[in-house]
Image (cartoon, rainbow, N blue to C red):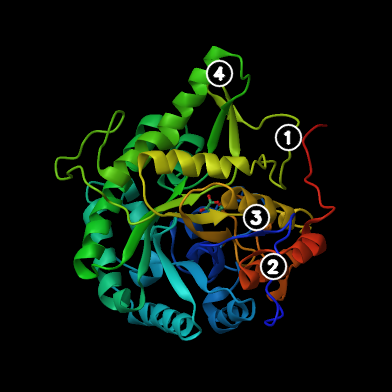
Amino acid sequence: MPDATQAPSFDPPGFALPGLTLGVASAATQIEGGDADTNWHRWADVPGRIADGTTPRRAADHWNRVEQDTALLGELGIGHYRMGLEWARIEPSPGHFDRTAINHYRDELTALRAAGITPLVTLHHFNNPGWFEAAGGWEARHALTVFDRYVDYVLVNLGDLVDEWITLNEPNVYATKGWVDGDWPPGVSGSIRRAQKVMQTMAAAHIRTYLTIHRAWPRAKVGVANHLRAFAPKRRWNPLDRVSARGAEYLFQTALTRAFSVGRFLAPFVQPPDIDPGHYYDFQGINYYTRSSVTGLADGVARRVPVNDLGWEIHPAGLVEVARWTHERYPGPIWITENGTPDAADAFRPLFLHDHLKAIAGSGLPIERFYHWCFTDNFEWAEGEEPRFGLVALDYPTQQRTVRESGRFYADIIANRGVTAAAYRRWVLGRHYPRNDA
Ligand code: BGC
């Protein structure tokens, strides 16, 4: 805790973060545990699909540990918490809603608010009910009206407790993994066309949800958690690589961001007849992790760069690059709705945090919020339990939570509203990133 009688010193290499509010992020399927019948539970039950053979059934057992986790947020002084809802729990069969599940979320939201923690609630984070998936999921003809029905129920039952909403998490990652790479449900490989169709439907779902929320709660803040990647040509001097990088960027994020932000659906999308161009965000939510190095149709990781436990390039300047790109096209407040790194040893996470926050501090952009991904370690989709993204380490068998040094550092940044010179010396100095030089 800082000494209240003394202003914190931000002498270099420290820096202040005026105007930036920090929080942490999570997602229902990744932390709750239990037997909810989701697309991911069904997917993980087929051997070989999750790298380490785990399923979302254990995760962080957050469903049974809400009280403990809320208390831990409070202990670390974290005042903003991004959390997800499990649609399959709320609507276990089509049109039938579970009072116990929605009341559980009411209790959680009430407890967060009582602890002075502002929730930011995600309606969809890669997680469909099993019955929705089985009926065609986001490709089904009635997908939009089925999603509307769930949204309506949530708004009636939770709307009084939530002022900030994320409609959808990363439609581009969801569609690419599920329909192009095929290693996420529904497991379709190589169909860029179907992936684009799913993104188009999800952009429409966002706009409908945006309007629905505002009709019910005019002052609510609503946006998408948009996964934006920095794209670079593998060989900077090569014109073909440069064109490929722009092309990959366009298909992955440029057209989608335009569609959901302002309702303009450019090729390969088709303008839906019931959507008018307009302004469909109260903040631009950005999830930023890494940079892609592109050549031809392949998108990979550059050589001789810093990398994390999953081999993704660590490139802090890219965060500001994508935020600036967004701001120039879709001005308004920017919320970094996810940023973090898998680092099981917690060896470089403090440096990662420092570098990304420093990039924000010097950016001159209206970045208002920053949510670290993640609060506790959790079920990392097809990678299972192995990658460790948490500020809080999780011992899965005992479910014991232990705050990592990076968690202590983050708490210190929140308390001081910046990185003090002393914090820099304690947590950052002398740390290095692993590299893929070998
Ligand atoms: C997703 C999270 C995920 C994180 C790390 C984001 O793409 O929203 O669910 O755990 O990245 O891979």
Give the residue drawn at x 73%, y 53%. Answer: 351
Give the residue drawn at x 32%, y 76%. Answer: 158
Q: Residues within 10 Å of mark 2 (few under 14, many from 20)?
A: many
437, above or below 47, in the image? above
Give the residue drawn at x 14%, y 45%. Answer: 274
Q: Is residue 192 toward the left or the right of residue 294 in the image? A: left
The answer to whether residue 358 of the structure is visible from this angle is yes
Q: CA distance from mark 4 to mark 1?
A: 19 Å
Q: CA distance from mark 2 to mark 4?
A: 39 Å
Callout in the foreground (4, 3): 4
The residue labelled by disc 3 is: 53
User: What x and y, as percent, mark residue 428?
Assistant: 78, 57
Element assignment for label 3: loop
Residue 305, numbered circle = 1
Element assignment for label 1: loop
The residue labelled by disc 4 is: 241
In the rendered image, the residue lying farthest to the left is 273
Q: Are marks 1 and 3 in contact (CB under 8 Å)?
A: no
Q: Earlier in the sequence, mark 1 or mark 3?
A: 3
Q: Quadrant of the N terminus?
A: bottom right
Q: CA distance from mark 2 to mark 3?
A: 28 Å
Q: Are marks 4 and 1 in contact (CB under 8 Å)?
A: no
Element assignment for label 4: helix
Q: Mark 4 is on which residue type? A: Asp
103, above or below 94, in the image? below
Callout in the foreground (1, 3): 1
